[in-house]
Amino acid sequence: MSEGIVTKPYGRPASTWKFLLSELKPRGNPWTIFNMISVPTVIVAAVIIVIRFIYGLSAVSNVTQSVPWGLWKGFNVVTGVAFAGGAYVLTFMVYILGMEKYKPLVRVTVLNGFLAYTFYAIALILDLGKPWNIINPIIGNSFGTSSILFLVAWHFILYIFAQLIEFSPAVAEWLGSERARRNLKRLTIGAVVFGITLSTLHQSGLGALFLMAKGKIHPLWYSEFIPTLFFISSIFAGLSMVIFQGSILQRVFAYQLDKNSDENHNIMIRGLSRVCAIAMFVYFFLKIVDSVHNHTLTYLMTPMGVWFMIEMIGFVLIPMLLFVRGVRLGTPFTIKLASIMTLIGIVLNRMNVSVIAYRWDEIPRYIPTWMEIVVTVSIIFVQIWIFRWVLHRMPVLRTMESMTAPKPATQGN
């Protein structure tokens, strides 16, 4: 992948509005399998959202007063924020540690993180019984400025702006403004440091929210170290998403990449795999120590205990060993398989903490409706639409000088 950095001046479009209108036009064949699946799904989701706001949350969701966090919060917010962790990890590696070889991955990862946080905020509004009260944790009303929710809310807002600043030079290059690009580049390092600080706090802050749920979460998943575990898991979750996403982009956007991109990509994912393996080892070790300290190993012989072992052994220990094997043997397939298993494991863990192991003994159990599932999938689809649109038009994977390269007719928007 190229760094997406302009190396020589370029002119501003003659008419910005005409340029923007022309960029809104679809490129390539719109009748792709993805479009034919995603468009009807998003339309149905739009109808469901209208029903939700007219008739209330109970009309489309199975959340209750005792189980207030359903699929939209558990997956789109709690799980999704972990997947977006690659942005702060990569920017730390590149801008703070000076690991320049990973710089080609920064822009696309920051873009993914920015879109993820934006759409997760939207999902949060959908899951509130009284969505207009979203302002309360932001202003501290009814909660106080010392509450964890106040901290997380402000970290989300500020981090979205920090990521926007980090990505803004690419927008300036796309619009042909050299002066704007130079000025925005000066803000990058400050935004990076600010963003990394915010990320380390709100990744753990999300876990800290569950400290108030002692007695409601199964003992195998509840721990005083939930904030630390959430932070550590966001490291290997975010980097696994970078590996998984990069493997897809290598194929879908091959026309934007140089001849050595495959080789460079394999070198980069081996380095990221090392970080994943180390973080997963620390996470696994802390979970064992925590289970021993809190005397929860006796629960392993219960049905929930078996489910816990599936999560820990099948989707933490095994992918960790696969990462190690992939690094030692230099096999990209093993690394990609490990990244997929890790992502599944993160979904299991975050859904266990926020939904499955929350009020695990309550009858009837919370089961998401088909409408909740459709909306969740649609949020991901719309995020992919915008992500794809940006990659086709802005210098994210390539430089402005190469943006006139011919595109295959099979590419979508």
Image (cartoon, rainbow, N blue to C red):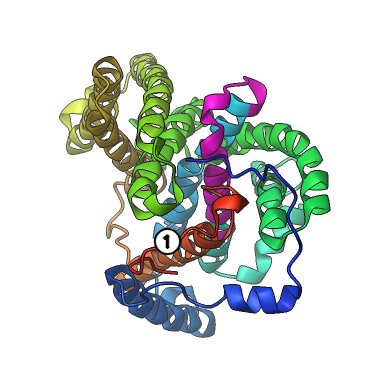
Give amino acid for label 1: Ile
* 48 is within the stretch colored magenta: no
Which one is nearer the viewer's eye here, 244 or 286? Answer: 244
Binning the other alpha carbons within 10 Å of mark 1 as few (below 14), some (14 to 19) or many (20 upward) gives: some
Q: Position of residue 98 (x, y in %)?
A: 62, 21
> Quadrant where the C terminus lies?
bottom left
* Magenta stretch in the rendered image: 95-119
Which one is nearer the viewer's eye here, 6 or 146? Answer: 6
Q: Position of residue 59 (x, y in %)?
A: 41, 79
Judge left or right: residue 349 versus residue 305: right
**What element does badge 1 sit on?**
helix
Which one is nearer the viewer's eye here, 331 or 217? Answer: 331
As drawn, 373 above or below 83: below
Residue 116: tell me if it is visible: yes
Judge left or right: residue 264 versus residue 53: left
Callout count = 1
Residue 215: tell me if it is visible: no
Which one is nearer the viewer's eye here, 97 or 143? Answer: 97
* Quadrant in the rendering for residue 4: top right
Q: Position of residue 164 (x, y in %)?
A: 68, 51
As drawn, 99 above or below 158: above
Residue drawn at (39%, 19%), measured in percent from left and top? 274
As drawn, 320 above or below 62: above
Residue drawn at (37%, 81%), measured in percent from left and top? 44
Residue drawn at (72%, 77%), measured in percent from left and top? 17
Q: Which residue is mark 1?
A: 380
SS majority, magenta: helix
Q: Position of residue 339 (x, y in %)?
A: 32, 35
* 118 is within the stretch colored magenta: yes
